[in-house]
Image: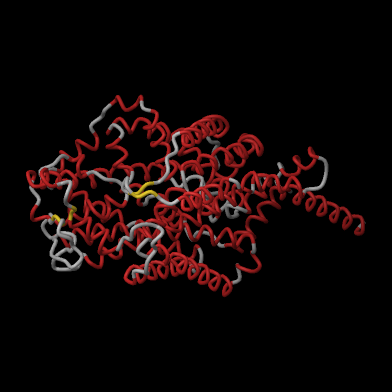
């Protein structure tokens, strides 16, 4: 009886919220979300920096111990509850609902990564010019210290490297960003970047305005086409002179790095970042699955796809960096960079050295745009879904939902105009460094595992996954949830606080004290949600301390379902008595 009532409830909830039209849509959307910029501009550099092929040892171990178990946990939570990342906790452990509010704050800071899409659109527009502007110093924004590609040779670079800046760097800093002296000088809005920002939010709106009905269809293109571009760039990269020298730097194993604790920390951080863990996205995407979807099998294939893409992207990046190093007559480590420096300075410079530079530049920036589009619209959709689940009657109605999404996207477009000012890069770096840090992810991982592994019960959740997927997970996952992930995350959290260093830009710009205070406010705004919510609920719930704790540690719906079940049974008995 209880199982039938639960199935009827799940079916009705699915009809109200909507579901993926097919399993393919779910796989593509999740793949599009987890395969993003971190695979292209972060993993290859970390691999090279931390021992080459030796880095794959801690990366692989932590993917098995932390990545895959957390991926399954979060996906299964969404699929079981059919709710967003806030309301799902009322059906699991109401005391831990602060985790959902913490995810919400982290998501709002995560929106700032739309700026990468804005930059890529700007570069894409300039890629159609007859002469790529980041290749020469014959532009109005260039300085007397500019060094164009035509003047690169080893002796010149060696003699003048401290007094010159590359044409690519000057295009990035002076033409596109128009960098001011610091965050204190926001300056005016860069109207070209503002137009790119508007285009990015418009694209996001039309990708999600109908919920999963529209985002699932968009993913057929945005999730698959980057792989076409990646394959094209891989083939081109491997055929360039000097490519194998770059790949040697990428993969040459230095086993001495395995004794460095920082290497293991960075491997774990990359797993969390790349797999989209402890930020609520997987909960929401899983909530649109049918109840009996095999999420256990899905998590293995999706994690393998993510890590495999990261590995292949390393060949794409370092084959081109090897070619670039040979052209300039320098070592690969001289040109190797991570993050925006790789995507918007080093790689564009390398494409300008190739035959048909415009074509390769278009391919690269088109790939970057599509990688960021997927991740961004899924991030926004997960917040929209979560808020809609909190106010279903108000926000799920067809016309009201579209208006809500429009107002939401419009509001953040206006907020993000601060990011496209002359001092916007300083704001972006501040949010990136403090808004969604490793400490936040580690803290959320600890709380999530304690709530599910100990309070809700790992064995109980194993039974639920078995009921949904049709097969019981390996017992190894239970030990990961209960012991390994909390202990490893706690260690990483403590080390982050012990080794913490304030943000600096290019090792010369130091933020004012008020900016650092703002940064710590962003960090604490997500972390403190968990204890503040728990304390607030303990104060508001009636009863003794033990009674309140017992109520808040048991699913709210279990009590409601039990009461409803008793009511239905009583009605049936009453009907039978009247009939008799």
- Does any portion of residue 309 appear in the rendered image? no
Q: Where is residue 554 drawn, in percent x and y?
A: 72, 43
The residue shown at (18%, 57%) is 167
Looking at this view, is 419 or 246 the one in front?
A: 419
Name the quadrant of the C terminus: bottom right
Drawn side of residue 381 relative to residue 135, left or right: right
The residue shown at (24%, 47%) is 317
Looking at this view, is 301 or 481 the one in front?
A: 481
**Quarter-of-image position of residue 203:** bottom left
- Does any portion of residue 480 appear in the rendered image? yes
Q: Where is residue 32 drawn, in percent x and y?
A: 39, 54
Q: Where is residue 15 drawn, in percent x and y?
A: 60, 63
Q: Which residue of the protein is positioned furthest toward the bottom in this rendering?
A: 399
Looking at this view, is 459 or 62 the one in front?
A: 62
Q: Is residue 351 above or below residue 459?
A: below
Q: Where is residue 55 drawn, in percent x and y?
A: 32, 33
Q: How is the image coloured?
A: secondary structure
Query: Total number of numbered labels?
Result: 0
**Quarter-of-image position of residue 169:** bottom left
Drawn side of residue 356 relative to residue 77, left or right: left
């Amino acid at each position: 009886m209880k199982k039938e009532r639960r199935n009827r409830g799940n079916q009705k909830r699915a009809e109200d919220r909507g579901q993926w039209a097919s399993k393919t849509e779910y796989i593509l959307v999740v793949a599009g979300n987890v395969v993003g910029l971190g695979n292209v501009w972060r993993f290859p550099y970390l691999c090279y920096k931390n021992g080459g092929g030796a880095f794959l040892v801690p990366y692989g171990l932590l993917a098995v111990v932390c990545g895959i178990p957390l991926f399954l946990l979060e996906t299964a939570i969404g699929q079981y509850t059919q709710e967003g990342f806030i309301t799902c906790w009322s059906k699991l452990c109401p005391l831990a609902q602060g985790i959902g509010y913490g995810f919400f704050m982290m998501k709002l800071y995560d929106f700032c990564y739309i700026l990468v899409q804005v930059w890529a659109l700007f570069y894409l527009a300039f890629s159609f010019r007859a002469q790529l502007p980041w290749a020469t110093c014959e532009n109005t924004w260039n300085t007397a210290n500019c060094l164009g590609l035509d003047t690169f040779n080893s002796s010149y670079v060696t003699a003048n490297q401290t007094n010159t800046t590359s044409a690519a760097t000057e295009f990035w800093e002076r033409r596109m960003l128009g960098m001011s002296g610091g965050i204190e000088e926001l300056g005016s809005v860069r109207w070209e970047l503002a137009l790119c920002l508007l285009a990015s939010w418009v694209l996001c709106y039309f990708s999600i305005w109908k919920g999963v009905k529209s985002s699932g269809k968009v993913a057929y293109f945005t999730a698959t086409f980057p792989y076409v571009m990646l394959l094209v760039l891989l083939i081109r990269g491997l055929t360039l002179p000097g490519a194998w020298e770059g790949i040697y730097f990428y993969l040459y194993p230095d086993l001495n790095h395995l004794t460095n604790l920082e290497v293991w920390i960075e491997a774990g951080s990359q797993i969390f970042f790349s797999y989209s863990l402890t930020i609520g996205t997987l909960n929401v995407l899983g909530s649109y699955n049918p109840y009996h979807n095999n999420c256990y099998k899905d998590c293995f294939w999706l994690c393998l796809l993510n890590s495999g893409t990261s590995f292949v992207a390393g060949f794409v990046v370092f084959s081109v960096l090897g070619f670039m190093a040979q052209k300039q007559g320098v070592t690969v480590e001289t040109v190797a960079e991570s993050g925006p420096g790789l995507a918007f300075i080093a790689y564009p410079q390398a494409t300008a050295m190739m035959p048909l530079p415009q074509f390769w530049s278009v391919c690269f920036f088109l790939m970057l745009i599509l990688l960021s589009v997927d991740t961004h619209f899924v991030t926004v959709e997960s917040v929209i879904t979560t808020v809609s689940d909190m106010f279903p009657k108000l926000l799920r109605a067809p016309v009201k939902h579209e208006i809500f999404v429009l107002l939401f996207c419009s509001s953040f477009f206006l907020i993000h105009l601060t990011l496209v000012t002359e001092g916007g890069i300083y704001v972006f770096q501040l949010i990136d460094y403090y808004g969604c840090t490793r400490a936040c992810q580690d803290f959320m991982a600890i709380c999530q595992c304690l709530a599910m592994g100990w309070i809700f019960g790992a064995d109980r959740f194993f039974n639920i996954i078995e009921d949904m997927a049709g097969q019981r997970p390996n017992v190894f996952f239970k030990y990961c949830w209960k012991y390994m992930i909390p202990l490893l995350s706690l260690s990483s959290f403590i080390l982050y606080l012990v080794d913490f260093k304030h943000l600096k830009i290019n090792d010369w710009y130091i933020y004012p004290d008020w900016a650092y205070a703002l940064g710590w406010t962003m960090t604490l705004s997500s972390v403190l949600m968990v204890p503040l919510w728990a304390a607030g609920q303990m104060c508001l719930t009636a009863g003794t301390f033990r009674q309140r704790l017992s109520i808040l540690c048991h699913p709210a719906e279990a009590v409601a379902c039990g009461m409803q079940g008793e009511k239905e049974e009583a009605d049936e008995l009453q009907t039978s008595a009247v009939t008799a």
